[in-house]
Image: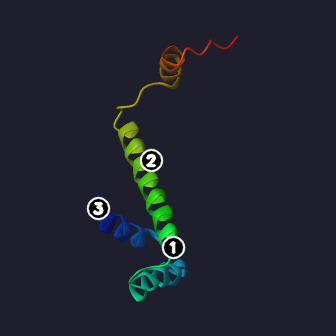
Amino acid sequence: MTIKELLIQEIDSTPDELLPDLLSLVRSLKSTPHGQLNTYEQLLERIDYLEAIIGIRKGLESFDRGEGIRAERAMTALQQQFNIPPRL
């Protein structure tokens, strides 16, 4: 997914009362060609957040399709991989 697609998805899922804040951020990026460091950092944080949300959604969709594994099996695999002793 591209940044543009992420932003469009974010705008679509943003409650109406929060849209002015989001649009204000976009306007500030356009109005300062060289950008402010703080605004740039906020944008990067938001992109990281969006990527995390998309990853979670993909994981949930995968689980809904029955592609996941049981928690007990996952924990056993992690214990073996990282040499974690079993719980008593």
Q: Which residue is mark 1?
A: 37
Amino acid at the residue labelled 2: Ile
Q: Position of residue 23 (x, y in %)?
A: 45, 82
- Mark 1 or 3, nearer chain start: 3
Q: CA distance from mark 1 to mark 3?
A: 22 Å
> In the image, residue 64 lies at what x, y percent?
39, 39
Image quarter for residue 59? top left
Q: Secondary structure at mark 3?
A: loop
The image shows residue 33, relative to residue 1, as above or below, that is below
Viewport quadrant of the N terminus: bottom left
CA gap between label 1 and label 2 equals 29 Å
Query: What's the amino acid at mark 3?
Result: Thr
Q: Nearest the camera: 64 or 27?
A: 27
In the displayed structure, would residue 49 be above or below residue 88?
Answer: below
Q: Nearer the viewer, mark 1 or mark 3?
A: 1
Residue 56: assigned label: 2
Residue on which disc 3 sits: 2
Dot in front, 3 or 2: 3
Is 25 placed left or right of 6 in the picture?
right
The quarter of the picture where residue 61 lies is top left
Looking at the image, which residue is at 46% across and 69% down?
43
Q: Residue at x 51, y 25 (%)?
A: 71
Q: Give the colour scheme of this rendering.
A: rainbow
Left or right: 80 as drawn, with respect to 88: left
Looking at the picture, tell me which residue is in the foreground, 44 or 15.
Answer: 44
In the image, residue 67 sits, relative to residue 57, either above or below, namely above
The answer for how far apart the CA atoms under marks 3 and 2 are is 17 Å
